[in-house]
Amino acid sequence: MARLVDQRLRRFLRTTATLLTLAASGLVMAQGAPVKVLVGFPPGGGTDAIARILADKLKDQLGVPVVVENRAGAGGLIAAQALKAAAPDGNTVFLSHDHTISILPLVMKTPGFEPARDFVAVAGFATFVNALAVSGGTPAKSVNEYVAWVRAQGAGKGTVGIPAPASVPEFLVKVIGQKYALDLQAAPYRGSAPMMADMLGNQIGAGVASVPDFIENHKAAKVRIVAVLGGARQAVLPDVPTFAELGLAGFEDVPYYGFFAPAGTPKAAIDKFSDALAKVLALPEVREALTNMGLSVGMMSSQQLASREHAYAQTWAKIIKASGFQAQ
């Protein structure tokens, strides 16, 4: 009897030790605990749509619910701070593009986080380009026609919507204005969805944002994308010229999309999520959906995403400094 009890005790201790080891490595989550995907912009925008496409498939690969949680505001700052405060257990990730991770630390004195210290890159999955689009209420079908329209309407003064203040689109508005000798003022919104609502209502004549933010309404002829950044025309927009073609070079380094986790998240948990994401990106329907939104889909490892983020931040640090912008 004593031997039987001793054997059972040893089995119990071995099982407990195994479970504790797995939990420490980030492989075991609470029974049915969902993976939370933080998004720093409101529902209805391009980033939110991308998150929901991926979350729907990630749940099958991870075997747990994957929930998109919108923490909109301040260009993704609120979501970034929520990620910093989250437990590093693999249950919380942040789907972000360049603005929050690379740009905010360059334009804010105290963003409340340092990417290299507070976050770990999990995996990247796409790059994209920003674009200039005009609303349906303008007659313009090209950049030159838009320039002529602004000059005719307001003596060279115009307002251009942007998804967030002190963002790449804001600096692009300034550069576009300088190139065409226009007095263009950037009008910041809390994400692309409210900006798009004003463009569709002809409350604002143009906007600068990512191609995924504009593409569906462009296809529906409700807005018109008239130029894109990057080094080449986009496959989803073969008739739209690049700004480089129009004589505005220097913006060929394209932004990225990726997932980030709190610092201290175990490598095993990062690898598990990255592997699941790679399988999701291999699905034809997912690649097609993301490509049709204007993304260039391509898997980036944790190290590749971290390197890309660092290089992108260095590029824009020089551009922001040259613009004379002072961190707020």
Image (cartoon, rainbow, N blue to C red):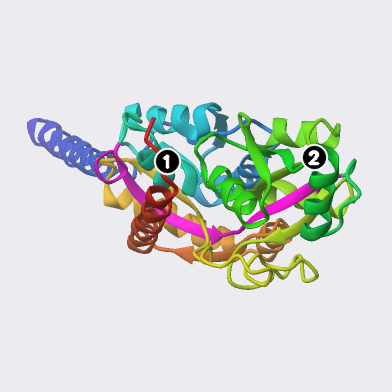
Work out whether residue 154 or residue 86 is closer to the camera in this orientation and state it. 154
| Residue 14 seen anywhere in this rendered image of the structure | yes
Work out whether residue 24 or residue 214 is closer to the camera in this orientation and state it. 214
Task: Identify the magenta region.
Answer: 114-135
Q: Is residue 85 above or below residue 254?
A: above
Q: Amino acid at mark 1?
A: Phe
Q: Secondary structure at mark 2?
A: loop
Q: Residue at x 68, y 55 (%)?
A: 180
Q: Is residue 89 above or below residue 214?
A: above
Image location (x, y in percent) of residue 183: 66, 42
Chief secondary structure of the magenta portion: strand
As for residue 134 lying within the magenta part, the answer is yes
Q: Which mark is residue 205?
A: 2
Q: Residue at x 58, y 71 (%)?
A: 231
Circle 2 residues within 10 Å: few <14, some 14–19, many ≥20: many
Q: Amino acid at mark 2?
A: Gly
* Tag 1 and tag 2, C-beta contact below 8 Å: no
Q: Quadrant of the C terminus?
A: top left
Q: Residue at x 44, y 59 (%)?
A: 275
Q: Which residue is mark 1?
A: 325
Image location (x, y in percent) of residue 255: 51, 57
